[in-house]
Image: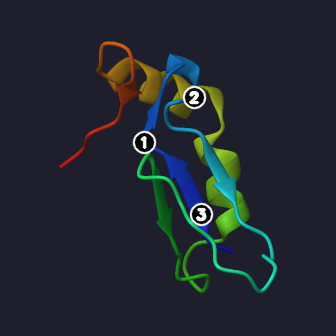
Amino acid sequence: GDVLFARSSVKLEGTGQVAIVGKLPNKKTCFSGFIIRFRLNTEKIYPYFLNYLLRSNPYREFFISIATGTSINGLFMC
């Protein structure tokens, strides 16, 4: 149920992509520094709805419009 959010990508279209992590095998897992991993309070936000929302055209267009970079585009929000 963790959410993965790509804050950086070589391709502009890859910036801001989101995915929900299913069950992983009982092995150690490493995540890239280009990925933000977070866990939601599922009593307040349903992860699959967030996944659907962030993949929608308005959000995709927004993420692409605010991405900055030269060869690697990234979302840097404060």
Extreme residue in the left direction: 78
Choose the circle earlier in sequence order: 3 or 2. Answer: 3
Left or right: 6 in relation to 28 = left
Q: Which class describes the residues within 10 Å of circle 3: few (<14), some (14-19), or many (20+)?
A: some
How would you rate the neighbour count of disc 2 (Cα within 10 Å): few for under 14, some for 14-19, many for 20 or more? Answer: some
Color encoding of the figure: rainbow
Q: Which residue is denoted by mark 2 in the rendering?
A: 14
Asked which quadrant contains residue 1, the reply is bottom right
| Viewer-closest of 41 and 73 | 73
- Secondary structure category for the residue under label 2: helix
Q: Check the image and report above or below for 54 versus 45.
A: above
Determine contact: label 2, label 1, CB under 8 Å: no
Residue drawn 71% across and 66% down?
Answer: 21
Residue pointed to by mark 3: 3
Q: What residue type is labelled 2?
A: Gly
The residue depicted at 29 percent of the width and 21 percent of the height is 68
As helix, strand or loop, the secondary structure at mark 1 comes to: loop
CA distance separating discs 2 and 1 = 9 Å
Q: Is residue 54 left or right of residue 15?
A: right
Q: Which mark is residue 55?
A: none
Image vertical order of residue 77 relative to residue 19, above or below: above
Q: Could you tell whether 78 is left or right of 76 in the image?
A: left
Q: Mark 1 points at which residue?
A: 7
**Callout 1: 10 Å neighbours few (<14), some, many (20+)?**
many
Expressed as whole percent of the image width and height from the top left, the position of residue 27 reads 73, 81
Q: What residue type is labelled 1?
A: Arg
Up/down of 16 relative to 10, above or below: below
